[in-house]
Image: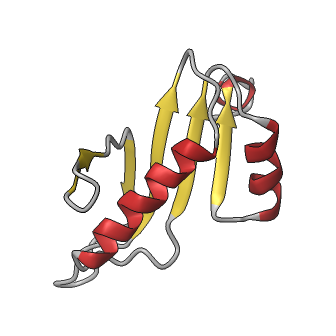
């Protein structure tokens, strides 16, 4: 997605919407970024938050959007601490993805 104010592009790897409700578009439930070989930090969450704000400005319902980081190499201690306190941030590591009961 374009960020004209910062003259950059923000890449979103995962976008989850609720089903449309009548004539209205679905709510944006989650935005996510996936990194395999890079430890994820607040920098990644900041980009997701910026993308959420840009989508809200375009009229998307983002009031409950979860910012999700999918990290193959883990997360910084600071990001783990923030996620533990903020229900709007989710960290999904390899143990979560490959857990024996992850998908039922």
Using the image as rendered, state which of residue 59 and residue 100 is in the foreground: 59
Q: Is residue 59 above or below residue 74?
A: below
Q: Is residue 17 visible?
A: no
Q: Residue at x 79, y 45 (%)?
A: 78
Using the image as rendered, state which of residue 4 and residue 85 is in the foreground: 4
Q: Is residue 51 above or below residue 21?
A: above
Q: Residue at x 75, y 25 (%)?
A: 95
**Residue 72: which quarter of the image?**
top right
Q: Is residue 34 visible?
A: yes
- x, y percent for residue 69: 57, 41
Mark count? 0
- x, y percent for residue 15: 37, 51
Colour scheme: secondary structure
Q: Residue at x 22, y 82 (%)?
A: 24
- x, y percent for residue 65: 49, 67
Q: Residue at x 25, y 46 (%)?
A: 8
Q: Spot the residue most to the top.
A: 37
Using the image as rendered, state which of residue 26 and residue 57 is in the foreground: 57
Viewed as shown, does residue 54 lie left or right of 98? left
- x, y percent for residue 35: 51, 26
**Residue 23: which quarter of the image?**
bottom left
Viewed as shown, does residue 58 lie left or right of 68? left
Viewed as shown, does residue 50 lie left or right of 83? left
**Residue 19: which quarter of the image?**
bottom left
Quarter that holds the C terminus: top right
């Amino acid at each position: 997605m374009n960020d004209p104010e910062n003259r950059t592009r923000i890449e979103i790897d995962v976008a989850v919407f609720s089903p449309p409700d009548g004539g209205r578009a679905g709510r944006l439930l989650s935005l996510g970024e996936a990194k395999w070989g890079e430890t994820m930090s607040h920098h990644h969450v900041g980009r997701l938050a910026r993308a959420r704000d840009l989508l809200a400005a375009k009229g998307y319902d983002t009031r409950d959007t979860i910012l999700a980081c999918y990290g193959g190499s883990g997360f910084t201690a600071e990001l783990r601490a923030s996620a533990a306190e903020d229900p709007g941030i989710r960290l999904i590591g390899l143990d979560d993805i490959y857990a024996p009961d992850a998908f039922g």
